[in-house]
Amino acid sequence: LLEYIWELDLARQTGIFHVTSQNALTKNDFGRHVSQVFDFDESLIHDTVAKQPRDISLSTEKLTQALGHRPDTQLNGLLTSQLDLKRT
């Protein structure tokens, strides 16, 4: 996500942008992706029922138009982070 913020700055974009991935995931699904990518114990993640709207996703249309490309998915972002950690 920092790369997208950097791109916005270099392009001298101003305003409010939803800098997030292109796909919406529940917190549980995101936790499962994190546990799979980084080899954590997925059994520690339990489904919960929260009193919040079912869909709290944000539109990335303005970000996509400003950058000239769609932001990556959350899973691809995690996989990139995993590769970056292995390089260090």
Image (cartoon, grey):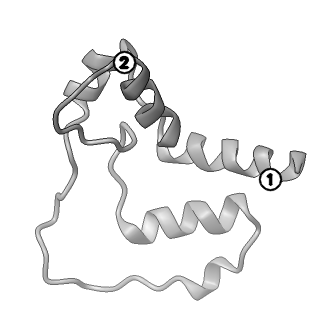
Pointer 2 residue? 67
Q: Quadrant of residue 54?
A: bottom left
Give residue 4's position: percent from left, percent from top: 44, 32
Number of numbered tags placed on the structure image: 2
Give residue 5's position: percent from left, percent from top: 41, 36
Indicate the amino acid at tag 1. Leu
Which residue appears at 22% of the width and 83% of the height?
50
The answer to whether residue 71 is left or right of residue 48 is right
Indicate the amino acid at tag 2. Leu
The tag earlier along the polypeptide, 2 or 1, is 2
Q: Residues within 10 Å of mark 2 (few under 14, many from 20)?
A: some
Whether residue 47 is situated above or below residue 85 in the rendered picture: below
- Give the numbered dot on residue 85: 1
User: Which structural element holds mark 2?
Assistant: helix
Give residue 44's position: percent from left, percent from top: 60, 87
Q: Nearer the viewer, residue 72 or 63?
A: 63
The answer to whether residue 53 is left or right of residue 38 is left
Give residue 69's position: percent from left, percent from top: 40, 16
